[in-house]
Image: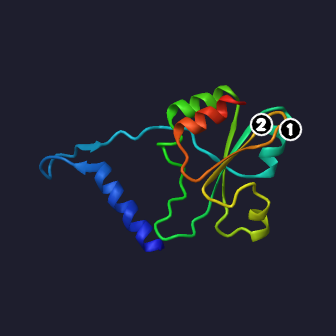
Amino acid sequence: MAKSAVFIAVCILGLLTCSCGESDINETIVAPVPKLPHFTGYSSQRFEPHHAAGKPVLIYYFGNWGVGADPSPSEDLFTREVWRLAMSAEVLMMQDDLTDADPRVIEYLPTTQLPAIIIYPADESQMPIVLSGKMTETMLIDAIGRL
């Protein structure tokens, strides 16, 4: 599994960077890569103070159990518009890898289907918003809009 991931990464890097011209020309063309804010890894030390300050938290839960499973958040789902809305609502964007988690942790999630997005609204009296399965940008924008 690790060897195939390295092979894929090398192939992608090879596609993104290509040398052009003769060997005496040192020009390299690099394909533009969209720059999106990064998720922070889940930690209660970051979650609790942010949420206690009355700000929402989004956690992208994933598990890398299957062959060909892609645990990374998709740029088709987490578009610039999603990030813009999340940042304007002061949403803390976190991710949590449950691949090696204790099964009891997963039992406490409101869904067992991964990947899943759970948005904890700023108002602790509100129920978390749960998205799982075939998620779309529209669904995520709607969920963030309900905050």
Q: Dot 1 lies on which element?
A: loop
Pointer 2: residues within 10 angstroms few (<14), some, or many (20+)? many
Kindly identify which residue carries mark 1.
124
* Residue 7 vertical placement versus 133 (above, below): below
Q: Where is residue 35 in the image (x, y as percent from the top left)?
A: 47, 37
Q: Which of 132 and 6 is in front in this view?
A: 132
* Residue under the image location 65 percent in, 25 percent down: 88
> Which amino acid type is marked by label 1?
Glu
Task: Write down the residue under mark 2.
Answer: 121
Q: Which residue is drawn at 50% across and 59% down?
A: 70
Indicate the amino acid at tag 2. Pro
Q: In this view, does 109 lie to the left or right of 114?
A: right
Residue 113: quarter of image: bottom right
Residue 94 drawn at (x, y percent): 67, 46
Q: In this view, does 7 lie above or below 84?
A: below
Q: Is residue 22 left or right of residue 130?
A: left
Q: Are marks 1 and 2 in contact (CB under 8 Å)?
A: yes
Percent position of residue 105, x then y: 78, 64
What's the residue at 35%, 39% (across, down)? 32
141 displayed left or right of 9: right
